[in-house]
């Protein structure tokens, strides 16, 4: 299971819900484009420096995950691939690809909304955040606004299944 540590971060924990609400707003943008509603923001010094939401279907790009989009934007904004002193907020537990990018970008803190038992790499299925074989560790803060985040995903997939049933019946 994902763990939270006592590592110091550059923003107080009380703001986690505030930043997660911004990630949820990004997820809603994804949903409006018929994308899986996953959103992400990256925060540094009390400000959002990058935003992203899923664009896999729109771009037909398997790497079009919210986290990767936000990481690329943050790196461009900071002029560095090292995203030190940042925190990444995402509505769904990151997958292995995204956790790999988080580790490579040296992001110290990941705050996520709901668990992903089918593909999560921050404690559910795998835990890459604290693997001694890797050169970077990530502090995890799981389940922030979990019910709101999981509700977005449940509603999206229920609607998708309903549309498929209707299409199959015709």
Image (tube, rainbow, N blue to C red):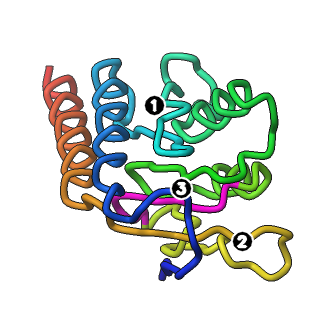
| Location of the C terminus (image quadrant) | top left
Q: In the image, which residues are magenta? A: 107-116
**Residue at x 45% of width, y 69% of height:** 141
Per the image, label 3 sits on a secondary structure element best described as: loop
Q: Earlier in the sequence, mark 3 or mark 1?
A: 1
Q: Foreground: 123 or 156?
A: 123
**Residue at x 53% of width, y 28% of height:** 56
Residue, disc 2 = 137
Q: What's the CA distance linking mark 2 and mark 1?
A: 24 Å
Q: Earlier in the sequence, mark 2 or mark 1?
A: 1
Per the image, label 2 sits on a secondary structure element best described as: loop
Kindly report the secondary structure that dominates the magenta region of the rendered protein.
strand
Q: Quadrant of residue 25?
A: top left
Q: Earlier in the sequence, mark 3 or mark 2?
A: 3
Q: What's the CA distance linking mark 3 and mark 2?
A: 15 Å
For residue 126: magenta? no
**Residue at x 80% of width, y 82% of height:** 132
Residue 115 lies, with reference to residue 160, above or below; the image says below
Residue, disc 3 = 94
Q: Residue 103: give x, y in percent of width and height.
A: 74, 58
Q: Foreground: 165 or 38?
A: 38
**Numbered disc in front, either 3 or 2:** 2
**Numbered disc in front, either 2 or 1:** 2
Q: Is mark 3 in CB contact (under 8 Å) with mark 2?
A: no
Q: Quadrant of residue 36?
A: top left
Q: Foreground: 82 or 133?
A: 82
Residue, disc 1 = 53
Dot 3 alpha-carbon crowd within 10 angstroms: few under 14, some 14 to 19, many 20 or more:
many
């Amino acid at each position: 299971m994902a763990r939270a540590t006592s590592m110091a971060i550059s923003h107080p924990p009380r703001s986690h819900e505030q930043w997660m609400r911004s990630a949820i707003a990004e997820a809603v943008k994804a949903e409006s484009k018929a994308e899986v509603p996953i959103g992400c923001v990256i925060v540094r010094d009390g400000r959002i420096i990058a935003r992203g939401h899923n664009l896999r279907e729109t771009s037909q790009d398997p790497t079009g995950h919210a986290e990767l989009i936000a990481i690329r934007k943050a790196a461009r904004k900071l002029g560095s691939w090292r995203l030190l002193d940042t925190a990444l907020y995402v509505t769904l537990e990151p997958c292995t690809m995204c956790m790999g990018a988080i580790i490579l970008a040296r992001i110290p803190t990941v705050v996520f909304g709901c668990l992903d038992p089918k593909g999560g790499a921050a404690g559910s299925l795998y835990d890459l955040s604290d693997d001694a074989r890797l050169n970077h560790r990530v502090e995890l803060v799981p389940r922030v606004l979990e019910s709101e985040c999981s509700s977005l995903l449940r509603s999206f997939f229920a609607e998708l299944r309903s549309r498929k049933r209707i299409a199959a019946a015709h």
